[in-house]
């Protein structure tokens, strides 16, 4: 008797009053302050990773708009961060900023600047628009050919020609990307947010040991493809 009533209750609840996704987000929002307070209390050097997904980093405050586990705190990076001014030493975000609009990305970088301490550092990894230019202009390059084959085999499907257009459209539209940067645009928005010493780095490389070898996107697409696709920029408050 109870089971049919439970089914009716769930049907009414999720059909009229809420959704499972809203309930999931509410659960993580309710836990957020506890996770933030615990992290800030425990760590003297404070490091924020925005868009952690399944790639949490030990010793970092890992946040995401859709947390994958209970160790990741909820945060919408396009809104005001739930953190005090000048409270962080480092901010890192990998393959996240391209998932929000240019306006959303600009707002995020301004919040990164606000919450970083003077001298604090930001590191942003994101697909490089110049890679797409290289795909179109040098389709015979062995590294480019491997990159195209990977995307089409994994994300498009069997029987599709290894044509750059399929690969480029997949990168733009299949993953919810909203704005793809090149070095000039990302450098500009970082400087507009207030960052200085804006510079490009190789994947995994940094003058600061705390920012070395923290990218994990290669787990998804391989080291060679990631080196071709990903642009990394750093800046200092």
Image: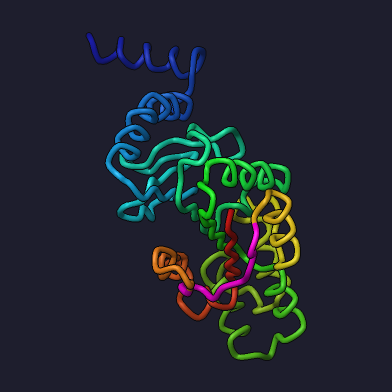
Relative to 5, say whether 119 is above or below: below
- Is residue 130 among the parts visible in the rendering? yes
Magenta-colored span? 196-205
Q: Main secondary structure of the magenta part?
A: strand
Which quadrant of the structure image shows residue 179? bottom right
Residue at 43 percent of width and 14 percent of height = 13
Residue at 62 percent of width and 71 percent of height = 200
5 horizontally vs 228: left or right = left
- Residue 63: x, y in percent? 43, 43
188 horizontally vs 110: left or right = right
7 horizontally vs 197: left or right = left
Relative to 112, say whether 22 is above or below: above
Is residue 202 on the magenta stretch? yes
- Residue 205: x, y in percent? 47, 74
Is residue 198 on the magenta stretch? yes
- Is residue 152 among the parts visible in the rendering? no
């Amino acid at each position: 008797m109870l089971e049919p009533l439970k089914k009716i209750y769930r049907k009414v609840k999720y059909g009229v009053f809420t959704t499972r996704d809203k309930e999931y987000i509410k659960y993580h929002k309710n836990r957020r302050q506890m996770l933030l307070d615990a992290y800030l209390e425990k760590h003297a050097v404070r490091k924020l990773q925005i868009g952690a997904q399944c790639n949490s980093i030990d010793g970092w405050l890992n946040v995401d708009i859709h947390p994958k586990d209970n160790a990741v705190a909820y945060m919408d990076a396009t809104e005001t961060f739930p953190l005090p001014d000048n409270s962080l030493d480092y901010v890192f975000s990998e393959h996240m900023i391209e998932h929000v609009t240019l306006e959303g990305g600009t707002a995020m970088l301004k919040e990164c600047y606000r919450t970083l301490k003077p001298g604090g550092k930001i590191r942003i990894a994101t697909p490089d628009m110049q890679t797409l230019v290289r795909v179109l202009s040098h389709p015979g390059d062995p590294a480019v050919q491997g990159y195209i084959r990977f995307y089409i085999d994994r994300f498009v499907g069997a029987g599709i020609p290894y044509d750059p257009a399929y690969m480029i459209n997949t990168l733009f539209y299949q993953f919810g990307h909203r704005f793809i940067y090149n070095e000039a645009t990302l450098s500009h928005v970082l400087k507009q947010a207030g960052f200085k010493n804006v510079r490009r780095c190789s994947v995994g490389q940094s003058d600061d040991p705390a920012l070395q070898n923290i990218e994990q996107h290669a787990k998804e697409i391989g080291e060679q493809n990631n080196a071709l696709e990903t642009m990394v920029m750093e800046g200092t408050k």
